[in-house]
Image (cartoon, rainbow, N blue to C red):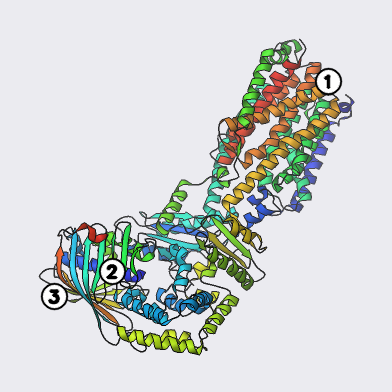
Amino acid sequence: MKIFSVSFSRAAALKLVFAICLCCVAVIAGRLQPSKEDISIMLPGGRGEVAHDMRLLQNSPWADKVLVFIQAPAGSTPEKLENTASRLAENLPDKFFSHLKDQAEFDLPRITHYFLARLPLLAGRQMVGELSSNFSCSQVQKQIAENYVQLTGPRGFGLKQAIMLDPLNLRRFFLKRLLPFRSFMSFNSGQGFILSKDKRSALIIASSRFKSSYSVHSEAMLRRLHELRLKLVPENFTFQVISAHVYATANARMIRSDMQIILLFSLAGLGLIFMVFIRSTKGLWILSVPLLSLLWALACYLLAYSQVSVIVLGFGAVLLGLTLDFGIHTYLGLGSNLTLSLLTRPLFLSGLTTCLGFAALYFSSIPGISQLALLSISGIIFACLFSLFVLPPLVGKIEDRVAKNKTIANRSFLFRSTCVFSKNRLILWLLALLVLGFGCLNLHFSGSLRDVGYFPPKTMQAEKQVKQIWGKLKKDSMLVVQGRSLQDSLEINDKIYEYFIISRQAAFLSLSSFLPSIQSQRLNLQAWRDFWSLEKISKFKSWAQAAGKKFGFSSLAFSSFEKTIESDYTPDFITLASLDQLGLSVLSGLFIGGEQNNIYSYLESGLSPKFSKFIAAMPEACLVSASGMGMAMEEGIKKDLVYYAGIGLGLMGLFLLAVFKNMSDMLKVFGSPMTGVLTVLGLSGLNSTSLNLFQVAAVPLIIGLGVDYGIFMLYWTREKTSVAIPMGVLISALSTILAFGALGLANHPALHSLGLTVALGVLGAAIYALFVLPSTFLKK
Amino acid sequence: MKKSAIVLICFWGIWVLATAGRCHGQDNLTRLGQSRPEIKSISSAFTQIKKLSMFDSDQVSTGFFYFKAPDCLRWEYSSPYEQGFAMCAAQGIEWNEISGLKQIDRTNPLWTTIADQLPAWSGLDMHKLRNTYNIFVEQENPLVLKLSPKSRQHIFEKIILTFTCKENILRQIVFFDPNQDQTRIVFNSTRVNEALPPHIFSKK
């Protein structure tokens, strides 16, 4: 082929490499922003629903909460625990946490009095509704009698104040609202922690200033907490930090530790392959193909996107590992002019088909995958051109150990294995496809992020303990209201809450329970005032006096309540500031957070269809749940798999058909990626394991490599000039299997599953390309 | 409601403490807890006198109290109105002449507190007592203890316990409100570790 005769001189090639490096580095340095570690880029619909929900989850008040769980050993005094928790809360560094110590002390009698005095603001309309149908002398008498019984009975100690302020027991409407808040009853925000009933455990609920996705800050924060633990917490105390930061940091640490082992095994494996098959220092130039491709692709990517995602970059580096194959084929082909010319066409073809496959990914519903497509296409085009034009002069003349003795080479096991027609192989392959196809029927996808993350057992255990001691503080689903202003959000929140009360949904924690909007409070107060006409006030007083006298109540026993029914009764409205003064800021802070004006409510389980319909009709409200997001992600993954395996393969097929003008050749090539993908999907189905996000993202790599193997081996079957091509495919497959097989050794679930998926997929594709494709389609 | 339950259990626990203890000073309080013989059951009559500003005169009630280890409790008033509660393990009932009989809602903090705290108090855990109250010996013989709540969240200003010296049992407990209201409960005919009919913890 002429193309190699126009190759550069070695010096020119070196200059070109230097210039490419310089340009890429300049672009990267000029455009690179601080990296993002945001997983939402890998979620379906990054510009749509799931990513929006993910943002709401990440910005929820719980997302930045750091729970510090401390447990005293048996025999320790409660004072010691309280002192420890108190000192720890006081010493939480301002750099990482917002202030705990400035909050007012949680004063239950004061809080009770505050809310009882504002019952008309909280539930005026409900109370009036009840009173309208039950306001009679007999009802008042009955209630006064019950008050007497209660006051003299076991409940009397705690009810005195409530009966004075509310002799008609209208507080029951408010108390109903507070039932879901039982877990929070023991809050003591003044000290910055809550104690368990047995006073053996304490929980500090702190707000972090940094999101868990900022791994550097997370690590620093956890390090500081560990230092505080050593300084302030007795050695025999249990100490556990529970937060998203812990999980993020544990994952980052595990990946770092895994990478050391993986790198060691990968390098050892690649070194072994190099020693066996290449045996020349010139062969090191092969590595320049993926390295320079990555540099080039990164520069192109940064020209299109201002901020680089660490996840995209990581995956991009892995995907561009397939460009190593171009280098291997060129290097092996350099020993033989015939082979090299033979290589040109398959190299171009494989590069273009892989690019077509990745082009389909550009339309993926996962934004990270779209970005990966751009990164990969630019890298592959570069690798293809670099391998053909620049790599040969860089390597120079080499002694082709493989092709040196054609006779010996052609007698090699590889040559003999690939060149023999075998009906049995075809039957075996078809049987294997049948079994794998059967496995695909049992294929499942998992959208759960839990399947791709590492969860430290100690933290999980501590989470369980916290749940056992204080109940389930964090609910499964969240209802988020996003109004124009806080009061606007509160008003919408009230509407939802009122609907919730009417339809009696499952446990629902809402800020409206104790902080209705000012508008709602006004309406409640107005309804209360409208009800208490002068006539009704007079009636109540006379009925209560008469009934009270019978039981020995003094004439002033209910004077506090009588003040609230006077027409000039104007209590201060309940506001966030007043709740803060009562020491309830920790509680209210669990409902307001993230983006400005967002109000979160928490649900134990999903919504009824009727309630869902009601919520769907409110543009300012949306339901967010981990399970809902998981389902949406599963859908997204399935959709993307159709893109990868369907549209990608379809485009490649059409292209190859146009090139070969022969359906048979196209199918021969396609057998390779198809076998690779079926191996992964089929084995996953047969093993009854679910494919996760990272495994699906690995499918294009298998398709890309599989097509390459297929194209090379198809050309080789036509000419069979040297064993260099099957040798190139073998080395390429072995290096990929070894590199990704090493990932399979990782402890981190994402790396482990990714490694095994690619290794198995490439194994399947390579077995087909090397042993099924040539032998099956060779003429006898 | 929750606080009233805590107080109720408190005074019962202190009473258990008293029945097992010796009539000595504060130094013996810890030993009192440690050397207490195993309590399997308690029964006692009581008279309750409430001096509340809401009433023109003192309100006097009488009734009975029963406990059976580990977690059965009955507190009932016989006059002037019949009312009370009985609970054992996860089950419980409460009644009064106005509302009638109803099942105890064990998810209610009042009953959850009782169920949680009962075993602790029956074990006479001085750590818990000292954690909730500052304990002062007001008088040695007969022993009079003043319990001052450590937390300002407490609805009582102080609690005074009076023990009989000879029988080592709680004779009287007085709860003082911050507004000078007080509730005095006087115990009599107390019996320890005697057989109790099982149905009293499940039926009215």
Going by the numbered disc 2, the residue's amino acid type is Gly
Q: Say what secondary structure mark 1 lies in.
A: helix
Which part of the image, by quadrant, shows the N terminus of chain A?
top right
Q: Residue at x 45, y 65 (%)?
A: A179
Q: Is residue B110 above or below residue A171?
A: above
Q: Is residue A666 above or below residue A602?
A: above
Going by the numbered disc 1, the residue's amino acid type is Asn
Q: Say what secondary structure mark 2 lies in.
A: strand
Q: Which residue is mark 2?
A: B84
Q: Nearer the viewer, mark 3 or mark 2?
A: 2
Which of the two labelled residues, at mark 3 and mark 2, occupies the earlier sequence position? Answer: 2
Chain letter, disc 1 residue: A
Q: Residue at x 75, y 27 (%)?
A: A670
Q: Residues within 10 Å of mark 2 (few under 14, many from 20)?
A: many
Q: Is residue A466 above or below residue A144?
A: above
Q: Residue at x 47, y 49 (%)?
A: A460
CA separation, marks 1 and 2?
103 Å
In the image, taking residue A156 as reference, residue A649 lies left or right, namely right
Q: Which residue is mark 3?
A: B142
CA separation, marks 3 and 2?
31 Å
In the image, taking residue A203 as reference, residue A658 lies left or right, namely right
Q: Which residue is mark 1?
A: A337
Q: Say what secondary structure mark 3 lies in.
A: loop
Q: Position of residue A643 (x, y in %)?
A: 73, 39
Q: Is residue A364 visible?
A: yes
Q: Is residue A58 visible?
A: no
CA separation, marks 1 and 3?
114 Å
Q: Position of residue A515 (x, y in %)?
A: 54, 72
Q: Position of residue B104 (x, y in %)?
A: 35, 63
Which part of the image, by quadrant, shows the C terminus of chain A?
top right
Going by the numbered disc 3, the residue's amino acid type is Pro
